[in-house]
Amino acid sequence: MAPLTGDFSYGEWNAVYNALSFGIAAMGSATVFFWLQLGNVSKNYRTALTITGIVTWIATYHYFRIFNSWVEAFEVNEVGGAYAVKVSGTPFNDAYRYVDWLLTVPLLLIELILVMKLPAGETAALSTKLGVASAVMVALGYPGEIQENLAVRWFWWALAMIPFAYVVFSLLVGLGAATAKQPESVAGLVSAARYLTAVSWLTYPFVYIIKNVGLAGPTATMYEQIGYSVADVMAKAVFGVLIWAIANEKSRLEGEGKLLR
């Protein structure tokens, strides 16, 4: 957790403030929606939808912590008709993001596998392999995130990309056959969830290297915080809506006797 450096403008500070606030609102409202919908889906999909709500609830908590830490790290005062921002000396704790990812990233993959309702053995094997790989990915990324040395940052980034590539390949290719076995009205939603996860996840390694390609100080911090916030909302809240849509459609088919329970 490196100290914040450079002179932040009010615009840069406010952009991060609003991005974090957006994260709280998106994750919090998504959690309420998912849990309110539990009674509207069949019991076969309630575990997946419960996990979906747990993911966004964990994210809501951590976004509150990041937001409060950001506010406490600065002093904002009116000076000559404008707002001036200066570092307060209180550390900005961005490690909450990695704690959040370590908890939620494996669950994101597990909820997708559960809502697909694959055979029990296949569900357990996929959940274990993808869950472990995603946790390793996050664990490998953190040591580089807190380093200023570019060589060290690139080293840990490269290591983290190994399990990252495995998970993304599994989403785009490995789950293709299982998706094809889904009902026609559901297969498109499952594919959308897979591709959304892959695309939103591809945002993270690029945000990670912002500080590796010459950007530094307040500008780099602003882009990093906004980038991670947008990616999180897509990967958790928006992805969760697709999980709900899949569970809702499969529940409808079950109710009409068009899908085996």
Image (tube, rainbow, N blue to C red):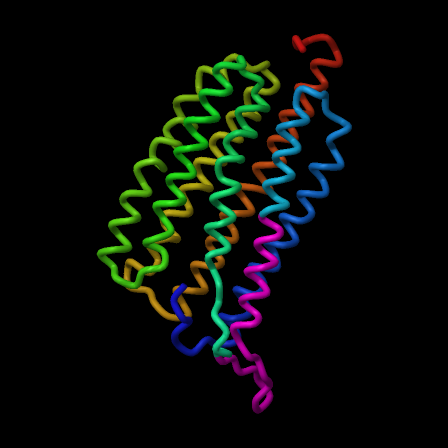
Magenta-colored span: 59-86
Report whether 167 appears left or right of 237: left
Instruction: Examine the rendered structure and indicate whether residue 161 appears above or below residue 21.
Output: above
> Residue at the location (34% across, 34% down)?
165
Residue 77 coordinates in the image, percent (x, y): 58, 84
Instruction: Examine the rendered structure and indicate whether residue 103 appears above or below residue 123.
Output: below
Q: Quadrant of residue 70?
A: bottom right
Report whether 2 appears left or right of 70: left
User: Residue 169 magenta-drawn?
Assistant: no
Which quadrant does the N terminus fall into? bottom left
Residue 119 coordinates in the image, percent (x, y): 53, 13
User: Residue 67 magenta-drawn?
Assistant: yes
How many numbered marks have been drawn onto this rendered protein structure?
0
Instruction: Examine the rendered structure and indicate whether residue 221 appears above or below residue 152.
Output: below
Furthest toward the left, the residue is 151
Instruction: Examine the rendered structure and indicate whether residue 240 appears above or below residue 64.
Output: above
Q: Quadrant of residue 158?
A: top left
Towards the viewer: 130 or 227: 130
> Residue at the location (46% across, 54% down)?
227
Q: Quadrant of residue 171?
A: top left
